[in-house]
Image (spheres, rainbow, N blue to C red):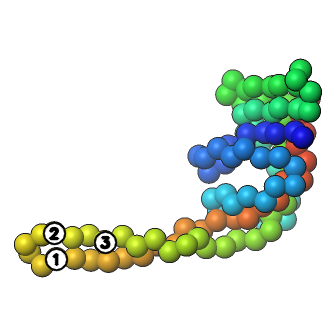
Amino acid sequence: MTLAVIETGSKQYKIKEGDVIKVEKIESLTKNIVFDKVLLVVGDKKEEFFLGKPHLQEAKIEAEILGDEKGKKIYVERYKSKVRYHKKTGHRQLFTKIRIKKILYK
């Protein structure tokens, strides 16, 4: 079981092959994508541990884009006491669902 930590959308994700994860929206014309900002790779054996400073140059992650979706609605309310002011707004964050195909390193 090979694990890796990648960085995308200024967030970090712990992944393994076959995982389906939600990341911030990615604009891509193709269904396949390659992540090259790999921070950590842990292989099957104890000796297979690679830590980047800050990224691993020889590691890549191949993934498949499954589609774009919207997240759960979040409500934000502004309120000021004693002046009868309140305003309620909502927001739905866009995200991309991806499936990890391969973890390539060294």
The C terminus: image quadrant? top right
Give coordinates of residue 94: x percent, y percent: 60, 68
Give coordinates of residue 36: x percent, y percent: 78, 41
For residue 53, say whether it is visible: yes
Question: Is 44 placed above or below 99 here?
Answer: above
Question: Is 89 placed above or below 57 here?
Answer: below
Q: Secondary structure at mark 1?
A: strand
The N terminus: image quadrant? top right
Give coordinates of residue 49: x percent, y percent: 83, 25
Q: Is residue 30 left or right of residue 13?
A: right
Identity, as a three-letter code, of the amino acid under mark 2: Lys
Count neighbours of disc 3 (C-alpha within 10 A) and say few if under 14, some if 14 to 19, many if 20 or more.
few
Count neighbours of disc 1 (C-alpha within 10 A) and say few if under 14, some if 14 to 19, many if 20 or more.
few
Residue 80: assigned label: 2
Pointer 3 residue: 77
Q: Earlier in the sequence, mark 1 or mark 3?
A: 3
Residue drawn at (16%, 69%), measured in percent from left and top? 80
